[in-house]
Image (cartoon, rainbow, N blue to C red):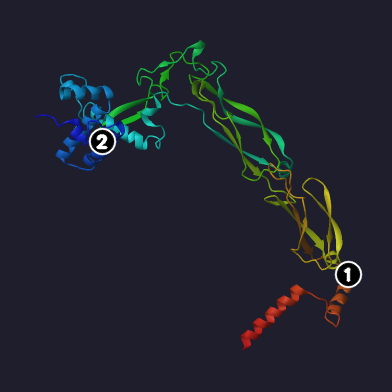
Amino acid sequence: MSKQDYYETLGVDRGADAASLKSAYRKMAMKYHPDRNPDDKEAEAKFKEVNEAYEILKDDQKRSAYDQYGHAAFEQGGGFGGGGFGGGAGFGGFTDIFEEMFGDFMGGGGRRGGGQQNFRGSDLRYNLEISLEDAYHGRTIEINVPTSVECESCDGSGGEDGAQPKTCGTCHGHGKVRAQQGFFTVERTCPTCNGQGSVIDKPCKVCHGSGRQQKEKNLSVNIPQGVDEGTRIRLSGEGEAGLRGAPSGDLYIFLNIAPHRIFQREDAHIFCEVPISMADATLGAEIEVPTIDGGRAKVKIPAGTQTGQQFRLRGKGMSILRSQNRGDMYIEAKVETPQNLTKRQKELLEEFRKESGGSNKQHQPETDGFFSKVKEFWDDLTE
């Protein structure tokens, strides 16, 4: 029985380009794939034909031979190698399509990487806690990071006495091996070279051929002025060393700002809650407060100040990252009720209370407003 023309099998013209061939193959392969057509012998046979056709036409040399001699070019060992499910050639095209669609997502890009993989070292994370003063002034901090560094014994080559890697005999330098399982070709990391594509006959006794060793690295981290909680600082090339001389990863410093005993921070502003005596809040006063830069500032408290009232000090807040400006500082008054009064103090307060209830009743907006609402509430209940 004569075979169908490969171009007719894929449904394309003889002058179709590579993109058209791949697109047509993809449609046909998906249409007749055995997983979509279980127990359908005709679909299975058609799927074999589609794969065989694409395997020939996608290769320029094979396509040229087919255009000149037809199917005879590949009969009796003419170059195709049998096709079908047993040899793997019949699935080569479908594997290409699968890798094209899913290779990058699965983390490798399939065979397009050209063999040797990138064995760049891993990126590292270091959590660093600093004080609010450090964030305000900026500073340089020394840290110790446990990591892997280039092996000093073999200078990162992984070989003892200058021994050089040679191509892995199992994967032939690709770093991956393939095996046929049912309808699919399964690709996995080479077990001999662990995906490196090369092996060393005389591995370094210190690093055992990896080209790196564990060590604690001392680094200086520059903390700029105005950094905030969660700021990330990247130190290029200070991460884990790569395998056998491959590039190192990066180190990421994540900043955490410790709570301050006096100040609270919100973006570029500083808040400070200051207790005010009842007498100062009532009569007015001038108080002295600390500032984040280590200095002092005077704040005038007007008579009748209430708890929660804020006073702004312009330009006394936090430094702003990559700017010469500063935020503001807010002083929040917290009127404090006196305790452990002397007998005389109590007598004076009693006199004050009596005076407050008479014709000289003082103005208390918060008290008056609250009890006015309470009266309205009770009146509504009795209606």
Q: Position of residue 189 (x, y in %)?
A: 38, 27
Residue furthest left in the image: 1
Above or below — where is 93 with respect to 169?
below
**Residue 48 visible in the shown view:** no
Q: Position of residue 172 (x, y in %)?
A: 36, 19
How far separated are the C-alphas under marks 1 and 2?
98 Å
Image depth: mark 1 or mark 2 in front: 2
Nearer to me, 13 or 245: 13
**Residue 274 sits in quarter:** bottom right
Residue count near mark 1 (Cα–Cα under 10 Å), binned few <14, some 14–19, many ≥20: few
Q: Position of residue 264 (x, y in %)?
A: 71, 52
Label 2: element kind: helix
Q: Which mark is residue 59?
A: none
Q: Find disc 1 in the rendering and name its residue.
A: 345
Callout 2, which amino acid?
Tyr
Q: Which residue is painted at 48% across and 19% down in the image? A: 209
Residue count near mark 2 (Cα–Cα under 10 Å), binned few <14, some 14–19, many ≥20: many
**Residue 64 visible in the shown view:** yes
Residue furthest bottom in the image: 383
Q: Is 242 on the left or on the right of 198, as rendered?
A: right
Q: Which mark is residue 25?
A: 2
Label 1: element kind: helix
Callout 1, which amino acid?
Gln
Q: Which residue is painted at 74% across and 52% down in the image? A: 328
